[in-house]
Image (cartoon, rainbow, N blue to C red):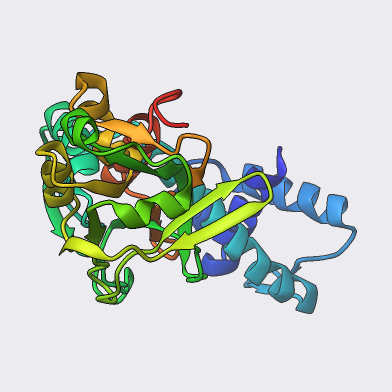
């Protein structure tokens, strides 16, 4: 008999205080229960029960072993339940907090909704620092450093900022060759929603680091608006590559200062560590990890 089976018999006898009752509950004979306990005692080298013709009681060693066995069997049962749940059909309400970068999220969320039609998506777009556990979110997608020890995490990918403008704009204005040339251009600046501050244009080339604070010709806290205005030829914008990839592919925008790398942001999906990972949450985590930043789509 393996240790798992021996512990199960031992716990049943300890709780029922009867070999015969434990046998009935387990669907085996009282003799098989007695032999199982005897083998376990022999393996451990201690007596677990004091036996008499009228009663069965735990020894001091048995009482100590009982608490450990209960915890071990509970962990085994939880592990088996968790593994079984991975094959269950993902369904039910899924509450997710996402950053205000809808241009990145929309296509993947649409694909997820089409693939998992039994999941009801409850989406909250916000750049504020939500409390995942206390506010009852099943998962959140965020960028930056991770600090909440109550959360599990999975890295989704890296986005990098690029300087872009419309071809028509650069037909009328010389392309900047160095970061300081930006000062002679109309600049479309992003105002960070969570702080209200204008985003600095951070550029790096080998060992050179430059932080630009261009004079704005326009500001907005909405990336899609800045992209649209750049496409319409209103100036140069400093935007994450995922926000402008399609426009670059269509030739509506072109990059400048390509020798200089913009700052980068790491995207994470986070979920509470003190909850069982439900099939719908697992499906979301795995889907986002596979599809948000497909291999080779970003630098």
Q: Nearer the viewer, residue 116 or 263?
A: 263
Residue 90 position, x and y percent, is 23, 38
Tag count: 0
Q: Nearer the viewer, residue 217 or 164?
A: 217
Residue at x 62% of width, y 58% of height: 72
Place residue 242 in its image quadrant.
Answer: top left
Q: Is residue 84 above or below residue 208?
A: above
Position of 42 with respect to 73 (left or right) is right
Residue at x 11% of width, y 46% of height: 229
Residue at x 22% of width, y 34% of height: 108
Q: Nearer the viewer, residue 153 or 267?
A: 267
Place residue 248 in its image quadrant.
Answer: top left
Q: Is residue 264 above or below residue 63?
A: above
Residue 231 position, x and y percent, is 14, 37
Position of 226 with respect to 156 (left or right) is left
Residue farthest along the top direction in this orientation: 250
């Amino acid at each position: 008999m393996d240790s798992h089976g021996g512990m199960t018999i031992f716990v049943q006898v300890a709780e029922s205080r009867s070999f015969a009752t434990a046998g009935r509950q387990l669907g085996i004979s009282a003799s098989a229960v007695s032999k199982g306990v005897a083998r376990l005692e022999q393996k451990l080298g201690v007596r677990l029960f004091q036996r008499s013709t009228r009663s069965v009681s735990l020894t001091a060693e048995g009482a100590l072993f009982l608490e450990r066995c209960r915890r071990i069997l509970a962990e085994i049962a939880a592990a088996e339940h968790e593994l079984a749940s991975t094959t269950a059909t993902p369904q039910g309400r899924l509450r997710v907090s996402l950053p205000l970068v809808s241009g990145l999220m929309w296509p993947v969320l649409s694909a997820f909704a089409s693939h998992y039609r039994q999941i009801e998506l409850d989406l909250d777009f916000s750049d504020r620092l939500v409390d995942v556990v206390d506010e009852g979110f099943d998962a959140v997608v965020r960028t930056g450093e991770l600090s909440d020890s109550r959360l599990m995490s999975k890295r989704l990918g890296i986005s990098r900022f690029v300087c872009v403008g419309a071809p028509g704009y650069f037909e009328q204005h010389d392309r900047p060759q160095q970061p300081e040339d930006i000062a002679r251009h109309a600049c479309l600046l992003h105002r960070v929603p969570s702080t209200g501050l204008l985003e600095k244009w951070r550029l790096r080339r080998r060992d050179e680091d430059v932080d630009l604070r261009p004079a704005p010709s326009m500001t907005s806290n909405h990336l899609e608006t800045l992209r649209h205005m750049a496409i319409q030829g209103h100036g140069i914008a400093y935007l994450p590559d995922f926000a402008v990839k399609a426009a670059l592919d269509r030739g509506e925008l072109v990059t400048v200062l390509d020798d200089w790398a913009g700052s980068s942001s790491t995207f994470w999906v986070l979920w509470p560590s003190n909850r069982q990972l439900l099939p719908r949450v697992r499906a979301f985590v795995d889907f986002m990890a596979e599809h948000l930043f497909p291999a080779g789509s970003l630098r």
